[in-house]
Every structure is written in structure tokens, then in C-alpha cells.
Image: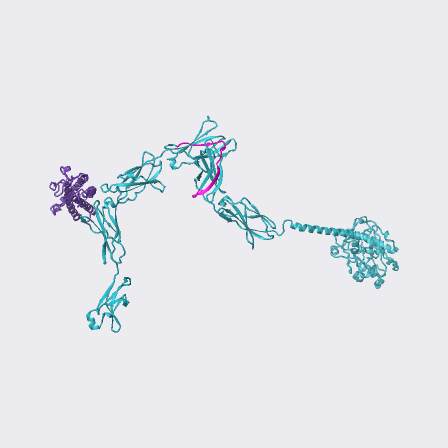
Amino acid sequence: MAAPDSPSAALQRRDLCSRGIRLAGKMRSDVVDLLEAYVERQGLDASASVAAVEGVPVAAAERWDEQTGTQRLLENLAAYRAFRALLAQMLEEQREQLGEADAALGRALAAVLLQVSAFAYHLEELLRLESRGPPSEEAAGPPPASHLSLFERKLRGLGVLRELAQWAVRSTRDLRQLAKPSPGSSSAPSPAESP
Amino acid sequence: FTALCILNESCLDFGNIYASQIIWKVKNRVVPKEQYREINRTVSSVTFNDTSSLATPLTCNILADGQIEQNIYGITVTIGLPPEKPTNLSCIVHQLSKLTYPMTCTWNPGRHTFLDTHFRLKYRWPQENFPDCIPKDVNNSCTITDVQFFVNLEVWVEAENALGEAESDPLVLDPIEIVKPLSPHNLSVDSGILPTVLKLSWENRISAPVMNLKFNIRYKIFGDTNWMQVPPEDIDSPRTSFSVQGLKPYTKYVFSVRCMKEDGAGYWSDWSEEKTGVTTEDKPSKGPAIWRTIEASHSPASWTVHLMWKALEPFEANGIISHYEVTVRAKSALSSPADKYNVNATNLTLKMPNGTYEVTVIAHNRAGASPPSVLLIPASNSKAPVKNVRTVPKDGKLWVRWTAPNNYVLKYVIEWCLVSNSADCIIEWQNEPGNIQGTYLKGDIKPFKCYLITVYPLYADGQGSGQSVKAYLQQDRPSKGPTVQTKKVGKAEAVLTWNHLTVDEQNGFIRSYTIFYKTIDGNETAVTVDPSKTEYTLSPLTSDTLYTVRMMAYTDEGGKSGPDFTFTTQKFGKGEIEAIVVPVCLAFLLIVLLGVLFCFNKRDLIKKHIWPIVPDPSKSNIAQWSPQVPAKHNFSSKDQMYPEGSFTDVSVVEIEADDKKSFSEQDLKPFDLLKKEKSTSEGHSSGIGGSSCMSSPRQSVSDSDEGETTQNTSSTVQYSTVVLNGYRDQTPVQVFSRSESTQPLLDSEERSEDHTGGGDSTTQRQQYFKRNRSQDETNADRPCFERTKQITCANEGDLAGFAQLQIADQSSQLLGLGLEENTHEAALSDVLLTSTEGQNMRAETVERNAPSVDEMPKSYLPQTVRQGGYMPQ
């Protein structure tokens, strides 16, 4: 693992941040497109308000600008790991529900899932550059949705995508913040400070 | 490759079969023993150092007792190679739609393995594997349907077959770096406010979050082939529109756009579809080039001036030219107002007085007017002309060069036209600036055509006269040769003429003519002739010889022969025939003349030999020795003389006796002289002694008193009986004279013409008896006198007015010529008359026994007769 302040590590971090930002931007763009397709295909109202869904991380953060880089990375990583599980579940449900009939929606969902995975990988790499390995992935996946009705599943999927779009925006801002040259500050937060 | 064949131990026991008996075969072909090796009693091996000689199946056979081959075992051999390591792996992401980015990777699969080799493209993220990409139908590329950007992807290729597997070097890349995006679409071109600006707009098909784009914009004038590009640094940032500046007014442009990742990673997209746009109009940038031709008018004091100007090129017109404003101002009279014309065409014909004029042309379009073009038309081209105008073909064009005059030249006008027989010289022209001394002709200059090029220098205050030159862009051989003809052919020379080839036939400058001429079997001779000539004299030629001549006309590129022409030289030269004929004729004439003179001088001698003097019987002295002439017998009875009814076919002509002299000797010629030869007397005349042309025997008998004597005395000759009629009203004196001579004719006297006989004078009246036509014809057709023949010239018994002549001179060649009837009759009458008189005279002479010759009457016309009794011929 590279030293945090070595030139190559800084270069690699900048590259990771840059590509992460681009990835987050593309992910948001794709999620927005996917949202439209999802609402249309699932017969939902685009303006329907969805209450907080269990297991879906919330992008909004208090005192966001006071967060350290590591905190941001850890929060992002946790969120995207959760999104990855949720999207995988949605993809499976999608296949069960619509079969191969709506391949386009499934492909878009799979693409977003890949991007979420890729973004999670970016975050893990950045955490490694921060001299702290990524936390081990919790074995427990997303809460089982088997108890939910089909409609509730659709609403939860809508909530997942909307929140993912929000997280894509937040992640872009987090990575930009990380990309800013702030000597010595990035490693200040301690693990105890992370949520 | 080595194979082993191991025999079961039991074979040794039961069949006495050992490894030494093993025979190896490849595809039923025995493998040479050198490749065998007996390892022990039960094992034999075969080795193939060259696997190319190995084939399937490879069998192990045993040679059993009785030389029987028995197959023991066989294997199928497959020859192949293990896969090589795939190399040159590269990938590209083609954008197919806004969200579809398949990635195609290609590699070099290496050598052919001869085996079924499987390639698979493997890729993975560091934390995630993806299913392999299996190529379909190919072994060097595979397409991953969807890739995610911004994460490094590790890509490699695995190759595997029965003999092994190989793996390429991994390729680690972020697919976003290898994208070939879709080209911008929905390109549109809008005219801007300025006539030099067009605004382009388009849509990008790759979202900004995925990729920031930079662009290329290319454009060209519609119809051109070369593209221009907007400077790349102007469009290296994401955008969807751009204003292209620096364009030409009122010009149609074609645009196209492409894009790629902003940082230059990846690939340029294809060019977008082309869109056209037209810039707005602007004022014409310059005035039209103007020139004139001046046509002398009938009146010497005025001109017909054809003004012509060239339509502006589109890049000069900057729009649609609506009209031209032409101003003509006479320079001599400054106070006179200028004439203005608005013309839509590009020419204007004006008839105006001689003088100096200034012509101004301004082109107008919707955006405004052009700067004026000015042409000074001087009263005369009195300024210095250019010198040494010459042309050079260069780069497929005709380059005209000239030497500038010493004065400052404003500009030059080069005028040219195609010289042709079939069309008029249509003038084309172009303007050139005054600082040059050569230019290309800006027109469709065709090769092999003659152009007349004229250069005029234009000065600020006048114009120089034009200097012309003829030129060809490219020369060729003439299209035909001259047709040669002869103008004049002599004995040793021939003058050939021909016409010059027409301009259309020349195809170049005629440098020379060559005349080829030859005889049929001779060598061809060539003569080069100056091209200005149209006539040539070939010499020396052989006389009376057939020559073939043809003519070639040469340009710089070669010659062309005209048709053959043949001619034959004359046998004699001019004047040769005359030189021969004239002397011959003169000599002939001289000889004739000399002959005539000779004959004239020697006429007496000639006459003596050719025309001897016939002795005159009147001078004969026979009478002197002959016995007494018997008594005359006069027949007084007219009736006896002319028995009635004896004239059956007689017409009577009365002729004045006085007129007898009017008959010339010529008139007497046709008279048939009769002769009778006594030895051949026969028929009616034989008994009468004297010949009686018209006396009948009966009459003769009756007239003869001494008929018996006559008949019995052969020596008695009755010479003649002459009966004359009276002349007109006079009583005819009938005379019958009869020769009573018994003197036989002497042979020596046969030549003399002896007119003897007697006849009574009857009357003064003479009657002519016109005999019928048959008798005339008889007289005319043959002579009445022949030497030994007696011819009766009148019907028997018709004896009125008759002269009976007997001519004894057998040597005389007398010809009786028949004339026309009247003449004949007239002559006959005269002869009869004269003859009668002569006979009378002679009768009298006989009776009186003789007067002299000189005493013969003058009326006896033919002198010859008077001299010798010779009848006129």
C-alpha cells in the first residue's frame, strides 16, 4: 500500500477521485434515466412520495462540510455497498417479475449495479490510499423483502433509485472535496469519528 | 514421434511371435526398417523424426508363419501444434447509442495449430470477474456487449487446444479511454447577420457526465473538393454550436462535424452528415472587366462600338447581379453630359461619333454597387505597342509572353480567337495587370487548333495597337495531305500545283512540303518545297514515262501524305514536232516547186514523150497514090435518107449554127468518138464499108448502088456518110459523100486518124436527136471508142441529122466522157456540126482532089483536129 503523501499515491488518489467523480456523474445520469424507465415500466407516479425505506442509506448529512475525507469515504462506501445489495435484489426481482420481457430495464438496472460496484471499488481504493483498509463487508445483506407486497417492492425500488441519484450527487461533491489539496487533513479523522 | 508396440507374453508361448517380427505401417505403407527399434523380445518402437511423413492410421503388424501379415493394433494420429501466445491485443469501445457501449477487442492468434483451438477473451475488475467473451466464427476478436467506464478493466486472451494453452499479456484500461463516440447529429447551418459568417448547431450523442468532447469542423465551398477546417483550438471544449467566420459572401458552403473525448484519449467519431448553408449577399467586390471592339461604320465620322464586359465571378459578384450601369462620356467635350445605360446583358453596342470616350461599368446586386470599371477608348491606338509577342504551351495551357513597352502600362488586354474555316473568329479576351509580361489564356484552348492572339497595352491616356501572333496549344500531323495535280506536263519536266491545306486540316504550322515522285519501277525521289509555294516544277524527268507523285505536308509533329497522282511525260518536247514537220513540209513544197519549174522548162520535151504529135491525116499523101475516087452518090431524096417512121424516140433541138463557136473545146470533150475497125466489122455495119454509126444495114444496102460490089470486094472501103440538116429555115443541103476508095488501109497508117466517108449535105437546118436515156447512159458509162471494138451509138436505122464518124486510128486513146444531158447534147450538136462541116470539107477535098490545109474553114474548132484530126479530149 502506498504511503499517503507519496507523489504516486497523490497522483493515484487524484486519478481515483477524478474518475470517481466522472463515474458518479454518469451514474447519476444513468439512474435518472433508469428512474424514468422504472416509473414507466412499474406503473408508478413519478411524483409519488416515498417514505424512508428500511435499509436504504440517506444521502442527506448534517454538518457535511465538517466531515473528514475518511468519514466521507466510509459513509459513501457503506451506502454504495447497501445500494449494491438493494440493486442486486431489485434486479433479481425484476427478472422474476418481468422475466426477459423487459430486457432493456434489466440491462439498465444491471448497468447501474455495475457502476455502483465500480464506485464502491473506487472508494475502497481511496480508503486504502488513506492508509486504512476498507472495512470488511458485513455478511448481512439488505433486509429481506419477501414480506413486502409487490407494490411495496416497487415503491422500495423507486426509493432506492431516488436515493441512489441523491447519493451520486453527494458522492460527486465528496470526491471533489477529497480531490482538493488539503495537506495533512485527510488523515485526521479517527475511525472512532466515523459513523 | 515415437510409438511402441508391446506384445503380450502369451504370444511368445503360443505363436512364437517376437518383436522382431513386427512391421509398422503408415496408411498401409510400410515404414522403413531403419525407423524400427527392437527394445526387447516383446517391444518394438518406431520413430518419426519428420512428422510430415506421419499419417493416420499408424498400425503395428506381425509377420506370422507363412509370411502372413496380421494387424495387431493401430492408432489414429493427429498432428497439430499447441497455441501460441496471443499478441497485439487492443480494444475499442464503439458507441452504438446513448447508453450502449460495446467493446471490441482484437488480437493476433499466432500460428495455425491444425487443431481445434479455443480462444476466449477474459476481463475483470480488480474486485469482480465477468463472464468470458467467446468469439464466434473467428479467432482474433470478440465483442463485449457492455462495459462500464471509469473503472480499470483488465483484459486478456486465452488460447487452448489439445496440446496446451497460452495466455496473452493482460491489457489494463479504463474503457472510457478507448471510446469512439457517435458523431454529432442534427447538424444545422444558419446564416448570420454578417455575410461572412454561418452558425452551426448540432446535438451530441454522448452525455457530458460520460465524456467531455472536443470537435473538428470542416467546410468547403459547394462543389470544391478540398476541405478547410476551423482551427481545432477554437472548438476543443464541449459545445453544441459554433459560428464559422471568414466566409465569402453569397457562397454556398458545406459543413461537417466530428467529436472525440476532450483530452484526446480514444478515437475521433466519424464525420457527421454534411449540411450546406449560404452566406448572405454583399456588395460586388470589384467592377467587371471591360473591353470593346470597334467596327468601322459606313460613315467615316462615326463608329460602332461593341462594349463587352465579363460577368463577375461568384466570389466577386457576392450576390446576384441585378444590372450593370454603363456610363459613356466623351472626353473631348467635358461639358457634354454622360450617357447612362442600365443593361442586364454583358454587352452594349453604341453608334457614336469618332472620338475619345471614357466608359464606366458598375455592377449592382441587392447589397449594393461594385467599384466602377473604367475603359478609355481613344480616337486612335497611337501609343506604343508591345513587342515580341510569342506563345509557349505550358502545363496544358497556352502561355503568352510579350515585351512591355517602355511607358507605364495600366493593364493589358489579351484578345484571342479560334481560327477556323467553318466558323467566324469569335473574340475572347481577358484583362491582365500592367506589371506582368506573360499570362495563361483563361479559356478552353483546344489542342490542334490555331489561335490568333493579340495583345493590347492600355495606358492611362490611351491605348497601343494590338500585336498578334498565331499559336497552337499542341500540334499534330496534318489531317490530310495536299492534293497535287499537274499544271503542265512536258517531256522532261512537269509543273505540279496544289492548294494550301485549310486551317482546320493543318493541325499545326506547316513547316514544309515534300514531293515524292517515282516511276513504276523506279525509286522514289523526294523534294522538299517551301510551305509558301503552291507550284513546283519537277525536272529532269524521263520522257514518255508514267510517274506517280504524292505530296506530304509536315508540321512539327510529322507529316501526312496526300493522294497519289499519276501523269505521263510527253514523248516529244515542245517544238520538236514542229521542228520536224515544218522542214519536211518545206522540203516537199520545194521539191514540188522545182518539179513544176522543171516541167515548165522542159514542157516541149515532155510533150514530145508524153503527148506526141499525131500526124495529120489531111497531110497524108495517100490520095496522091490512091486510084480515082469513085463517083459521088447523092441521095437527093430526103425520104430516102430519113424514112418515115424510123424516128421513134427522138426529140429535136434547134441550135443556131452561128453559136457553134461558143462551144469551147471543153464542151466537145464529152463527145463520144466512135471508131470502127474494119477487121471487126460485124452486124449491120459490116456490109456498108464505111462505118455508119446510125445507119442501118438495110439503109446502107439500099443506099448502095453497088451493093454486090461492096459485098464482094473486101478491099472496097466506104469511109463515111454524113447527113446534115439545114440550119433553121434554110434548106438543108443534103450531102452524101461516100468514099469510093478501094485503097486498103496500111498498117503504117493505122495510127493516123482517118475520117473518110461521104455524106451528102442535107439542109442548113441541123437537128439534134436526143436519144433516149439508155443510150446516154451507155455513152456515159463506157467509151464509145475503143480500139478494137465497134460501138453503135445510135439506134439502127435512125439516121436523120446524124454524123457518122469512123476513126481508124487505133492507137489513139480516146475517151468518151459523158456530161450532163443538156451539155452533152449541146456539145454533141456542135461536134456534129463541126464534124459535119469538116466532113463536108473533106468530102469536097476528096471530090476536088484537094485544097490545102490552110484553106480549111476557120469554123473548124478544135485545132488539134485541124492539125491531125485528133479529137479534143
Give the quarter of the figure containing the C terminus of chain B. Answer: bottom right
The foreground one among B323 and B173 is B173
Q: Residue A6, located in which quarter of the rendered image?
A: top left
Q: Residue B35: where, in percent of width, then height?
A: 27, 66
Does residue A92 appear left or right of residue B667 in this picture?
left
Q: Residue B425: where, in percent of width, then height?
A: 48, 40
Give the quarter of the figure containing the N terminus of chain B. Answer: bottom left
Q: Residue A181: where, in percent of width, then height?
A: 19, 39
- Compared to residue B768, the image places residue A161 above or below, namely above
Residue furthest toward the top?
B335
Does residue B108 appear left or right of residue B456 in this picture?
left
Does residue B10 appear left or right of residue B55 in this picture?
left
The foreground one among A186 and B744 is A186
Give the chain letter for cyan: B
Residue furthest toward the bottom?
B66
Residue B386 drawn in magenta: yes
Q: Which residues are magenta?
A: B370-397
Q: Is residue B570 visible?
A: yes
Q: Residue B180: where, in percent of width, then height?
A: 26, 45
Residue B362 drawn in magenta: no
Q: Residue at x 35, y 40 (%)?
A: B222
The foreground one among A193 and B75 is A193
Mark count: 0
- Compared to residue B562, the image places residue A189 above or below, namely above
> Which coloring applies here?
by chain
Figure colour of chain A: purple
The foreground one among B501 and B74 is B74
- Compared to residue B192, the image places residue B625 above or below, namely below
